[in-house]
Amino acid sequence: MPNGTELGVSVERVHSLEALMEQTDTLSIHAPLTPETRGMISRAMLERMPKGGVVVSTARGPICDVDALADLLKRGHLAGVGLDVLPVEPPVEPIPELLRAYRAREPWCEGRLIITPHSAFFTPEAWDDTRLKAAETMRAALVGPRPQNVITPEMF
């Protein structure tokens, strides 16, 4: 985001992920899986969050350390966790502790953990929005203006 944008939307700019983690009580992860993001939300990063924080990930499983999430949730450092992704999908044995505890309805995760099978987006509204955005993107690519969600801008 360009400098100054944060003032218009009433947020404070931080200059490192570490600084962000120390200030946030709600972390919502929406990142593609790349070499830079793989393991980005590690145990060390999660431990930087203030006690009572909540983590939600709808990104890609290998970005966040689910074993650390389980430990921090069990110990009470995190108040809640919501996952729409796991490191391996579909999960295979040995399954992550977090998923095992969720399936077993262990008391330490009751009301504090939700895991969905990479389908949290699956609503009629989301499908409508996906179709609309796909049509808008195709129109922009074919007749202009320049498409907004271009991964390789040199193509245009």
Image: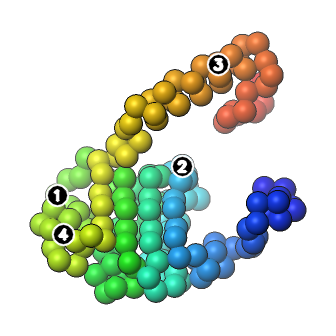
Q: Which of marks 1 and 2 is in front?
A: 2
Element under label 3?
A: helix
Q: Which residue is tagged 4? A: 101
Q: Which amino acid does label 4 sit on?
A: Ala
- Alpha carbons under labels 4 and 2: distance apart: 27 Å
Sequence-wise first label, 4 or 3: 4
Residue 63 visible (yes or no): yes
Sequence-wise first label, 4 or 1: 1
Q: What residue type is labelled 3?
A: Met
Of 53 and 63, which appears nearest the observer?
A: 53
Q: Which residue is tagged 3? A: 138
Q: Do the residues labelled 1 and 3 touch (CB within 8 Å)?
A: no
- Alpha carbons under labels 1 and 2: distance apart: 25 Å
Sequence-wise first label, 4 or 2: 2
What is the total number of numbered labels drawn onto the structure image? 4
> Residue 18 at x, y = what percent?
62, 78
Element under label 2?
A: loop
Indicate which disc residue 93 carries: 1
Residue furthest right as drawn: 4
Indicate which disc residue 29 carries: none
Q: Nearer the viewer, mark 4 or mark 2?
A: 4
Query: Badge 4: few (under 14), some or many (20 or more) residues near its Cα, within 10 Å?
Result: some
- Alpha carbons under labels 1 and 3: distance apart: 41 Å
Q: Which amino acid does label 2 sit on?
A: Pro
Quarter of the image containing the N terminus? bottom right
